[in-house]
Amino acid sequence: MGNDILFFNPPQTKNGVCLQNRALLWIASYLKKSGFSTRVFSLASTFKKIIRRALDYYRPKNVAVSCKWYTNLYGAILVAKEIRKINKEIKIITGGHTAAYFDKELLQSGYFDLVVRGDAEIPLLNILKNKTPINCTIKENNQIKRYPLQYTQEHEDLENYTLSEP
C-alpha cells in the first residue's frame, strides 16, 4: 500500500493501557493536508501483532512513535525495538516532551533515527520532503547532531485549521 508515515501511540504500562494522544491526530491531519498519506494507531497489550500487521499492510518509509509523557518512555522504546526487529530500513522518529529531554539517550539506544524537539508539524513535513530537519536531533556518523529550534507553532497557524476528512 505504501504509506508515507505511520504514527504509533505506545502503551503506557506493561498491561497495555494506552491514553489517547490527540496531538498525533493533529499532526497526521496536517501532513495529510500537505499531500502525504498517514495512519495513527493507539497500541495496547497486543501491540506487537498490531505493529506487524500495520507494517506489512501499509509498508511505510517512516514511523513516528510518540514519547510525549514520561509514562510513554518504556512503551516507546518497546515499540521502536519491535519495529527495528521487523524492518531495519524504516526511519523511526520520536517526539514529545520526554523524547526532547532524552533525545541523546534515545538516539544512542539504536532504536530511533531522529528525535523531534518542540512542535512537530513543519519538522515532520521537512523530513518527509527530504529537506534539512529543523527542531531535530539525529545520529549521523556515530555523532549526535542537534539542528536548531526554528519552528514554534503560532496562534495564526491554528486559526483556519481543522482535522482532515478520513
Image: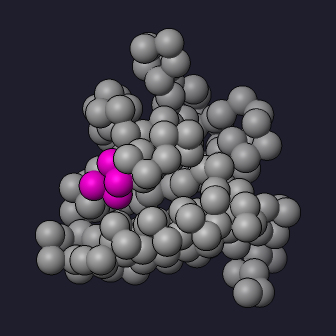
Residue 59 seen anywhere in this rendered image of the structure:
yes
Q: Is residue 139 magenta?
A: no
Q: Height in image: 123 above or below 166?
A: above
Residue 12 in the image: state x and y as whole percent: 24, 69
Query: Residue 150 is drawn in which quadrant?
Result: top right
Q: Which quadrant would the C terminus be assigned to in this image?
A: bottom right
The image shows a total of numbered marks equal to 0
Horizontal placement of 127 versus 144: left or right? right
**Which SS type dominates the magenta stretch?**
helix
Horizontal placement of 24 versus 129: left or right? left
Residue located at (28% from left, 71% from top): 11
Query: Residue 153 is drawn in which quadrant?
Result: bottom right
Residue 30 seen anywhere in this rendered image of the structure:
no
Q: Height in image: 156 above or below 110?
A: below
Residue 107 in the image: state x and y as whole percent: 38, 32
The residue nearer to you, when weighing 147 against 113, is: 113
Q: Which quadrant would the N terminus be assigned to in this image?
A: bottom right
Residue located at (81% from left, 76% from top): 160
Q: Which range is magenta?
A: 78-82
Horizontal placement of 37 versus 147: left or right? right
Residue 125 in the image: state x and y as whole percent: 73, 50
Residue located at (43% from left, 51% from top): 86
